Image (cartoon, rainbow, N blue to C red):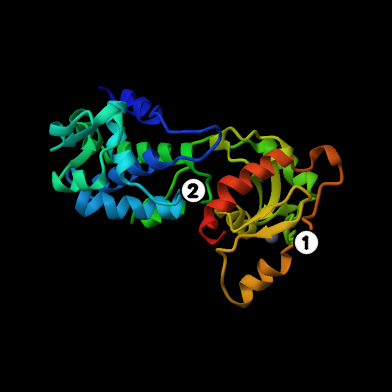
Amino acid sequence: MTPDELKKAVLGVKRWSRGDQRAPNKPLMMVYALARYIQGHDQMFSYEHEVEQDVTALLKRFGPSRKAYQARYPFWRLLNDGIWRLDNAQSFMPYKDNADPPKSLLIANDVTGGFSDEAYKLIIKDTAFAIELLESILVESFPDSIIPEITAHLGLEFTYKHLQKRDPKFRREVLRAYNYKCAVCGFDMRMDDMAVGLEAAHIKWKQFNGPCDVQNGLSLCSLHHKMFDKGAFGITDDFKIRISPAVNGGDWVKKLLFDYEGSMIVLPREKQVQPSASFLDWHHSEVVLSACTSHL
Ligand SMILES: [Zn+2]
């Protein structure tokens, strides 16, 4: 196996998906293992003592909301992707009709898992490659604004390099449509003729085939962009701001977010470039609800 083949295999990992639903379980499991390798961890991870706690925490914080967070799914299912190894599991493998074994069985047998021998060798031989791999997985699964939070959560200190090419046309068209203002708060600072702190946000994430079209964009200041990508607020089909019940905070949160609840965003003058309802609905169900399902 060459580094390129490994990268291809990692990015080609089969993700569980139903339509457009987010399922970052396997990416987060791989990112966790890669981060620990970079920090000097050996090849295998104990399900009971490491994965159960650490990967569940990652899924809770960065995955969509589910009734229960099951670190055992990606831990077990990555085996089918040909780049993973499980030890102490031979006696019950494959598990009944390819179902997933219960947590208790993984713990009772002290099952450990990690990248396959071949993959592990390539990863530890070259830290720069390990970082590149980790970044590629993140870029495929999460928007830019969230990636630094994940690397910080994992205790990684490297600066995240942007591997994907940006589309300058998207940014220009979106900011222009919104008259170079944040659609939520109207922020429009310029230094001479350069907009500062203003960004073109994708409503439906690029990672889920959200197109680089103005109808899938919003012009937002950096802070509202971050809040939007985290699901702190969404926008209804009639363009009103609705805030996730998960949000809390003091005076500044009131000023910067709660005070806008129910108000209309600033819309482009031309109707045909206003945000499309199907993208707003995707954002609501996959990003906003993921921050608040437990409250409904
Ligand atoms: Zn703003």
The quarter of the image holding the N terminus is top left
Q: Quadrant of ligand 1?
A: bottom right
Q: Where residue 243 sits in the image (x, y, percent)?
A: 65, 61
- Nearest-to-viewer mark from 1 and 2: 2
**Can see residue 52?**
yes
User: To which quarter of the image does residue 191 belong?
Assistant: bottom right
Callout 1–callout 2 Cβ contact below 8 Å: no
Q: Amino acid at mark 1?
A: Ser
194 and 178: which is toward the camera: 178
Counting from the top left corner in percent of width and height, residue 143 is at 53, 45
Rendered location of residue 199, percent (x, y): 65, 50
Query: Would you name the residue on which mark 2 appears?
Result: 64
Q: Quadrant of residue 232?
A: bottom right
> Which amino acid lies under the numbered mark 2 shown in the image of this protein?
Pro
Which residue shows up at 51% across the image and 35% down it? 164
- Position of 282 with respect to 137 (left or right) is right
Is 266 displayed left or right of 197 in the figure? right
